[in-house]
Image: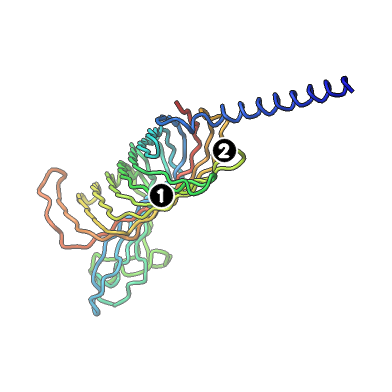
Amino acid sequence: MKKNLIAILIAFASINLFAESQNTAKENFNAADNKKISLSVEPLFGIRIGNFGEQVYAKHSSTGEVYKISELIYNFSPALYSGFETDLRIVNFHFSAGCKFFIPMQIGIMSDSDWCQDAGYNTGNTGIKTNLSEHENHLRNGFNLDLTVKYDFHPLSWLTISPNISFLLEKFTLSELNGTCWYGNPRSSSSYSYYSYDDIYNRTVSNCTGEIVQLRRTDYYVWAGVDGLFSFNKSRLDIFCGLYIAPYIYTYGEDDHYKRPRYFIDVTASLFYAGKIKTYIKYNFSKSAAIKLSGTFLFTGNMKGNELSSSTPNGKFVNSGGVIGASSMYTDIQLSGIFVF
């Protein structure tokens, strides 16, 4: 009987020691959750797929309605970048900053399309694409700065909801080199194309060399949104989704058209005309190290604005009276490591 009692006591003590060791390991893994202040550093590398758009509008010859007479699409297919993000957490507040630096390279094709028949001949037909040209799209430099402030709410042990506001600045220089032009032939003595660019019997095809266009574009966004963070498997796995809308967007673009020559400044400003979705999946090796795969999708409507133009790059720019537009649509996919201090 005495031997049996000793065995039971030893077994009970062993169970307690094992449970205590498990609790200690769990406490070590969650220790960072009890910190009032923490700082994370996140080096990253990614790709961008999508485009910038620029539009020019004209009035219909008979109805006076505004229609798109010209559009330039600068494709990112893809562009590569590297950078970092930092996050300072003070209790439930987060103050975040991130930068992306784009790698100079050819990133796809720029296409330039025109619908000139109504503008040149008052036919009322605005649906025929009369001109198309395609050029090599070279990224000279690109920079992205993102600043965010948010506050965490924890309605459930596995769920964090974080309303936030942020500011995004993007600045790019793109050069368009060489290419092929498909222009519908004019009718009578007009300089405007009349026939469709793909009418093989009534078009002119030509090649061009050298730098054709340079675009220097800066976009400013103010964002408001909400983040949702879902933590599973004792916080080893995190899944994130954020939804955002832009109360204010401002774009400033400078276009140098060297073959004309003609120089333009395009300015747009819009309210609540852009949206963004962010998502990621993150695996936490510990509370101080993790790996993350992220995706961000951003889109804007065709924002309208004013155009200034000049015949020389340093000349006086005057309002051309035309209506222009700017748009963006792209996806960023990136891989990053996270280190928490």
Estimate the x, y position of residue 153 in percent, counting from the top left: 43, 46
Residue ID for mark 2: 235
In the image, which is nearer the foreground, mark 2 or mark 1? 2
Q: Is residue 84 above or below residue 253?
A: above
Snapshot colouring: rainbow
Query: At which x and y percent is residue 228?
Result: 47, 49
Can residue 119 be seen here? The reply is: yes
Q: Secondary structure at mark 2?
A: loop
Image quadrant for the C terminus?
A: top left
Residue furthest to the right? 1
Could you tell me which secondary element the residue under label 1 belongs to? strand
Viewport quadrant of the N terminus: top right
The structure residue drawn at horizontal position 32% and vertical position 44%, both measured from the top left corner, is: 168
Q: Which residue is mark 1?
A: 75
Q: Please state if 236 lies on the left or on the right of 14 as rendered.
A: left
Q: Residue at x 49, y 45 (%)?
A: 229
- The part of the image, by quadrant, that contains residue 126 is bottom left
Q: Which residue shows up at 47% across the image and 46% down it? A: 154
Camera sees residue 104: no
Viewer-nearest residue: 4 or 45: 4
The answer to which quarter of the image holds residue 57 is: bottom left
Gap in Å between the C-alphas at discs 2 and 1?
A: 39 Å
Question: Label 1: how many residues lie within 10 Å, few (<14), some (14-19) or many (20+)?
Answer: many
Q: Earlier in the sequence, mark 2 or mark 1?
A: 1
Q: Position of residue 103 (x, y in %)?
A: 40, 34
* Left/right of residue 104 with respect to residue 259 in the rendered view: right
- Which residue occupies the foreground of this view, 114 or 143? 143
45 displayed left or right of 302: right
Amino acid at circle 1 = Asn
Q: Identify which amino acid the numbered label 2 is placed on.
A: Ser
